[in-house]
Image (cartoon, grey):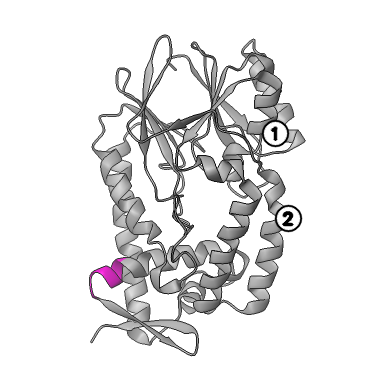
C-alpha cells in the first residue's frame, strides 16, 4: 500500500505478532523493529529479503513508542545498517537509558499496586517478571529528536509527527495527508482496545510515585483519540492486526466501551466501598492476579472518569485507597 509493507514480527507477549512497516522510499525506512530476540531478528531479515532488502540497506529507523515489542531491535539494526534513529523528543531520554527508565516505571507500578490493594507477594512476583522481561528491550542513541508537529520528509511523501499519549506517554503517530494514510502504532488497533497503561510522565519526575497524583492515562488517551478522530484518514496502519478503514466509527465504539466500563465500575462501588484490586477481581477474577498491573491501570482509568465527574470519591486509610460513591 503506497510503498508501505507490513512485516509481521513475532513477540513473546500475549498480543502476538507486532506490525513493523517498511517504507520503500528514500530514505529506506523501517517503522518499529520488534522485540530484542533472535527469533524476531531472523523473521525481520526474512521479511526484508522477501522485498529485496537487507538490514544493511536500512537508512532510517523510526520508533513509535516506548514498549519493548516496538523498539527491542533498534540498536542492533542501527549498528548493522548505520541507519538514523528517529523518535519523539520526549521519548529519546527513555530510549537512551532503557533499563534505568524501566526500573523507575516499575517503582511507580509497585507504589500504585500496594496503595490500591494488590497483595505484596503478587507485587514482588510481578517485579521479578518485569525485570526478566527487560531483555526484550534495548537502549539506543536517538539521532533525530522529533517534536509534535514536525515533518518527516521522504523523496515521495511527508509524514507529520503527532504526539498521541495515552496507551503510553510516548505514543507517536505519523500522518500522510496527501495519501490519507495514518501510521497509528498502538494508538488505535482494530481487534483489541489499547490499554492505557499508567506510566511515569515523560520529561519530568516530580510526584511520579505519589498515588494521589498518579497520571490519568485513560483521560489522556480519550483526549488523544478525539484528536485522531478528526483526521480524514482513509486507512490506519496499526501496530497489531489488520488495517483500520473506518477509524472514526471504531473510536466511537471505544468511547462507548469506556462509558460502559465506567458505569459498571460505578455500580460495583455503589454496592460497597472497594479498592481498585477488589474491583478488578469482581470484573475479571483470576486475570486480576496474572495481569495485575494491566487490570489496575484499566480500573483506575475508569475510576478517574468517575472521579472527574464527581460520581465517586477516593478515601485512604492505613495506606490503602478505596473508592466510594460521592455523597
Residue 306 belongs to the span the image colors magenta: yes
Quick one: which residue is furthest to the bottom in this view?
A: 318
**Residue tagged 1:** 40
- Label 2 packing within 10 angstroms: few (<14), some (14-19), many (20+): few
**Residue tagged 2:** 132
Give above or below for 229 relative to 155: below
- Position of residue 183 in the picture relative to residue 109 (left or right): left
Q: Secondary structure at mark 1?
A: helix
Q: Position of residue 25 (x, y in %)?
A: 49, 11
Residue 261 in sight here: yes
Which residue range is magenta in the image?
A: 305-310
Q: Quadrant of the C terminus?
A: bottom left
- Position of residue 111 in the picture relative to residue 327 (left or right): right
Quick one: which residue is furthest to the right in this view?
A: 38
Q: Secondary structure at mark 2?
A: helix
Give above or below for 199 relative to 189: below
Which residue occupies 65% across, 73% down? 122
Give above or below for 8 relative to 254: above
Which residue occupies 63% across, 53% down? 100
Q: Nearer the viewer, mark 1 or mark 2?
A: 2
- In terms of depth relative to the viewer, which is nearer, 174 or 46? 174
Amino acid at each position: 500500500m503506497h510503498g508501505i509493507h507490513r512485516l509481521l514480527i513475532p513477540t513473546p507477549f500475549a498480543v502476538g505478532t507486532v506490525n513493523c512497516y517498511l517504507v520503500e522510499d528514500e530514505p529506506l525506512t523501517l517503522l518499529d523493529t520488534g522485540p530484542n530476540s533472535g527469533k524476531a531478528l531472523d523473521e525481520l531479515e526474512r521479511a526484508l529479503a522477501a522485498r529485496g532488502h537487507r538490514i544493511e540497506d536500512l537508512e532510517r529507523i523510526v520508533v513509535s513508542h516506548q514498549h519493548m515489542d516496538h523498539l527491542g531491535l533498534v540498536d542492533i539494526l542501527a549498528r548493522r545498517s548505520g541507519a538514523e534513529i528517529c523518535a519523539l523528543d520526549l521519548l529519546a531520554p527513555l530510549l537512551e537509558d532503557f533499563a534505568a527508565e524501566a526500573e523507575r516505571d516499575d517503582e511507580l507500578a509497585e507504589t500504585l499496586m500496594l496503595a490500591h490493594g494488590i497483595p505484596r507477594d503478587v507485587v514482588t512476583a510481578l517485579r521479578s517478571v518485569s525485570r526478566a522481561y527487560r531483555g526484550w528491550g534495548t537502549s539506543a542513541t536517538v539521532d533525530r529528536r522529533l517534536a509534535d508537529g514536525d515533518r518527516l520528509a521522504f523523496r515521495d511523501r511527508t509524514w507529520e509527527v503527532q504526539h498521541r499519549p495515552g496507551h503510553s506517554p510516548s505514543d507517536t503517530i505519523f500522518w500522510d495527508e496527501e495519501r490519507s494514510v495514518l501510521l497509528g502504532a498502538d494508538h488505535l488497533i482494530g481487534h483489541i482496545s489499547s490499554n492505557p497503561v499508567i506510566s511515569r510522565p515523560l520529561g519530568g519526575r516530580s510526584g511520579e510515585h505519589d498515588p494521589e497524583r498518579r497520571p490519568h492515562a485513560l483521560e489522556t488517551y480519550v483526549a488523544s483519540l478525539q484528536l485522531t478522530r478528526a483526521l480524514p484518514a482513509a486507512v490506519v496502519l496499526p501496530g497489531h492486526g489488520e488495517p483500520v478503514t473506518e477509524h472514526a466509527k471504531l473510536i466511537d465504539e471505544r468511547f462507548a466501551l469506556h462509558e460502559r466500563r465506567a458505569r459498571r465500575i460505578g455500580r460495583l462501588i455503589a454496592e460497597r466501598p472497594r479498592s481498585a484490586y477488589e474491583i478488578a477481581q469482581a470484573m475479571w477474577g483470576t486475570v486480576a492476579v496474572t495481569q495485575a498491573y494491566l487490570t489496575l491501570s484499566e480500573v483506575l482509568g475508569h475510576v478517574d472518569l468517575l472521579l472527574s465527574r464527581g460520581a465517586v470519591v477516593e478515601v485512604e486509610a492505613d495506606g490503602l485507597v478505596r473508592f466510594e460513591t460521592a455523597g
